[in-house]
Image (cartoon, grey):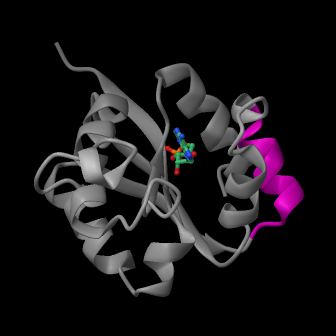
Amino acid sequence: MSNLEQTLSIIKPDAVERNLINEIKKIFTSNKLAIKETKKIHITKDEAAEFYKVHQSKPFYNDLCGYLSSGPIVVMILEGEDAVIKNRKIMGSTDPKDAEENTIRKLYGISIDKNSVHGSDSVENAKKEINFFFKNGQ
Ligand code: CMP
């Protein structure tokens, strides 16, 4: 049975800065994740704090919000079969040093903070995160 889903993906400042946008997009599309929407933006620290609110009690929260707002990012809606879990497999473990071979974070991640990409961790959060960046489908 088919299970078409959408998920939110972010190419983080470290990867945008190193001109990895096209390489990373190619990894998604060659794994049958269609890019339905994409935009390059530069968010404020307050917006990053709102986006990462689930992590507000974590010791790394302040640095995380500072980092996501430190430079341009690319936010995308990815669509495909089991898109949420598929995107997480393609990204690899949060810490690039633990990431599996050929995952985005293994290929391009620098550190647990500068780990090149973010992806929604559940269908429920994907809906919230897509809505956060693409309110009227924009
Ligand atoms: P991301 O998938 O965007 O979700 C939250 C981010 O917090 C995560 O990727 C990491 O880049 C960052 N982070 C920093 N320190 C940690 C940590 N100790 N555990 C998990 N995530 C961390």
Which quadrant: the N terminus?
top left
Q: What stretch is highlighted in magenta?
A: 43-53
- 3 horizontally vs 12: left or right: left
Residue beneath the point at 77% across and 67% down = 43
Identify which residue, 18 or 35, lies in the foreground. 18
- Residue 99 visible, this orientation: yes
Identify which residue, 28 or 111, lies in the foreground. 111
Identify which residue, 2 or 62, lies in the foreground. 62
Residue at the left extreme of this rendering: 101
In the displayed structure, would residue 17 be above or below residue 138?
below
Overall secondary structure of the magenta section:
helix
Q: In which quarter of the image is residue 15?
A: bottom left
Q: Is residue 116 magenta?
A: no
- 2 horizontally vs 13: left or right: left
Task: Find residue 36 and report its horizontal and vertical position in percent.
Answer: 43, 55
Residue beneath the point at 26% across and 75% down = 23
Task: Find residue 60 and report its horizontal and vertical position in percent.
Answer: 68, 45
In the displayed structure, would residue 129 be above or below residue 42?
above
Q: In which quarter of the image is residue 27?
A: bottom left
Task: Find residue 137 and report its horizontal and vertical position in percent.
Answer: 65, 50
Residue beneath the point at 30% across and 49% down = 91
Residue beneath the point at 53% across and 57% down = 113
Number of on-image labels:
0
